Amino acid sequence: MGRFFVRRIPQTVVVLFGVVTLTFILTHVVPGDPARLIAGPNASAETVASIHHELGLDESLFQQYLLYVQGLLHGDLGQSYALAGQSVADAILHALPVSIAVAVAGVLFEVLIGVPVGIIAAYRPKGLLDRLTTFGTLLGLSAPPFWLGLILLYVFAYQLNVFPLTGWEPPYINYLILPGFTLGIGGAAWYARLTRTNMIEALRGPYVQMARAKGMPERRVVLGHALRNVVAPLVTMLGMDFGYFLGGVVVIESVFGLPGVGKLTFDAIGTLDIPMITGAVLVAALFIVVMNLLVDLAYAAIDPRIRR
């Protein structure tokens, strides 16, 4: 296990280096001038030139890249263009707890809805519950998150006044239920389909038939034997989803007005805040890579055969 972990560290560094390089290049080739956006449309050419020099945008692209990588090696993500020179790392750290809370809420809704629905559908294939589940998963997969979020806000926040419209203040749970459900319902459909497919195969396995022949209670057969063979693919999806959500979900956080990393990234794109965009993408990539590593380690813990 230790060797596997050590071997993955160089791969992680290469992936993060590639993400930083690609993001840096793409943010510099898109149309637009950050200095002009900061100075305003009526600013003089001298003012724009002064801001260019202050931000280091008058240097060559290669020189800017070297300076940025040098800062990264010292733990510096740079200074935000749009947030009055605020540190990118400080801004992301301030927004990160919100994204973590949204990610946890989304994953909980995915698992608590998707896995039980998949088990119920698999227990009676082609039955009424199975057909209803298939129809429900299609609806969940087809509903765009931004559309579903706006509908939920209109019904439960504006019309019924059950939840707050936007914001982030105690009690935070009130601000997490709607975005968590919006984020998790699409994933729950995938979890239900994956659980159903693997459970049908597992319930037909010889070890399940043997357990039933021994008179083992049906609940123990389903949850103790069959479900165990569904855990590994579920762990993969769970790790990927959590890593992706931790990087900030731009659509969800923007629709619900949550001050997380996704909203921070969305605002940075609108102002061409290159250090903020690059820093947010780097953090998102770091979470995804780390969660991939944890998933691989969890695989080895779940199935000892993988260790060999």
Image (cartoon, rainbow, N blue to C red):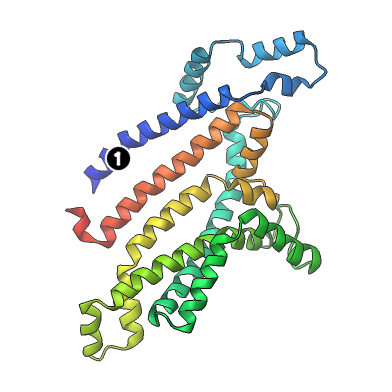
* Residue 157 higher or lower than 120, as above or below: above
* Residue 304 higher or lower than 9, as above or below: below
- Horizontal and vertical percent for residue 292? 37, 48
The residue carrying mark 1 is 8
Among all residues in the image, which is located at the extreme bottom?
215
Q: Residue at x 83, y 18 (%)?
A: 42
- Horizontal and vertical percent for residue 132? 52, 77
Q: Nearer the viewer, residue 120 or 290?
A: 120
161 lies left or right of 238: right
* Residue 50 higher or lower than 65, as above or below: above
Residue count near mark 1 (Cα–Cα under 10 Å), binned few <14, some 14–19, many ≥20 = few
* Residue 43 higher or lower than 149, as above or below: above
Among all residues in the image, which is located at the extreme left?
308
- Horizontal and vertical percent for residue 277? 58, 32
Q: Residue at x 76, y 20 (%)?
A: 39
Residue 139 is at least partly visible in this image: yes
Among all residues in the image, which is located at the extreme top?
46
Q: Residue at x 54, y 71 (%)?
A: 136
12 lies left or right of 36: left
Q: Amino acid at mark 1?
A: Arg
Q: Judging from the image, what secondary structure is the residue with disc 1 in?
A: helix
- Horizontal and vertical percent for residue 87? 61, 29
Q: Nearer the viewer, residue 88 or 107?
A: 107
